Amino acid sequence: MSARRPAQRLEPVSKTRLRLWLRLLKATRSVETELRERLRTEYASTLPRFDVMAALERHPDGLKMSELSQVLRVSNGNVTGIVERLVDDGIALREPVPGDRRAVLIRLTAKGSDEFDRLASAHETWIDALLGDLDPGQATALTELLERIPRDSTEEPSS
């Protein structure tokens, strides 16, 4: 039987950052849970569906499936079913890519843009209420602080 090594103690600054991470995670999960529930109960929709629609709304000329997956930072398999349902519901459509018979562009229909506008308005209202304990100055300051955290391993913190 091997002796267990004592856990290495973190420096006070590291503990503070660990607590910050746990608080950010808890806040994110709390807001996300509420958004999922409201989309489900008030609009019979899902957060992933909303996210796909938001990505397509930001790219009115359409996105290939691989581009859509890249924008959302998920695998093609994660968006395929959502896109299928959006197409079936008349929210999105597939268009062939000129010169590439295997690729298709996905974009929102007029109905899809209208539906997204409705969901986005509700989403903004919900976020405003959920984060309503922060005054605008606090929200701005917190946003600026969080922007100093790199988004991925290749991105440098902003100064």
Image (cartoon, rainbow, N blue to C red):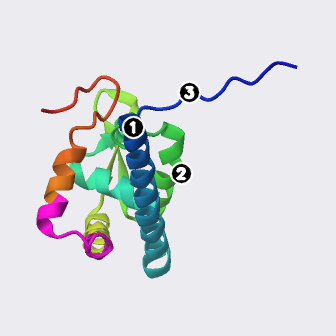
Q: Which residue extends farthest right?
A: 1
Which one is in front in this view, the residue at disc 2 or the one at disc 3?
3
Q: Is residue 40 above or below residue 139?
A: below
Q: Nearer the viewer, residue 98 or 128?
A: 128
Point out which mark residue 81 bears: 2
Residue at figure coordinates x 29%, y 76% from the top left: 129
Report if residue 152 lies within the magenta region. Answer: no
Of helix, strand and loop, which one carries label 1?
Answer: helix
The crowd level at tag 3 (other Cα within 10 Å; few <14, some 14-19, many 20+) is few
What is the C-alpha distance between the residues marked 2 and 3?
45 Å
Q: Which quarter shows the N terminus?
A: top right
Q: Which residue extends farthest bottom?
A: 42
- Can see residue 61? no
Q: Which residue is mark 1?
A: 12
Q: Position of residue 103 (x, y in %)?
A: 39, 33
Q: Which residue is mark 3?
A: 8
Of helix, strand and loop, which one carries label 2?
Answer: helix
In magenta, the rendered stretch is 122-139
Q: Position of residue 52 (x, y in %)?
A: 38, 53
Q: Nearer the viewer, residue 136 or 95?
A: 136
Q: Is residue 109 above or below residue 58?
A: below
Q: Earlier in the sequence, mark 2 or mark 1?
A: 1
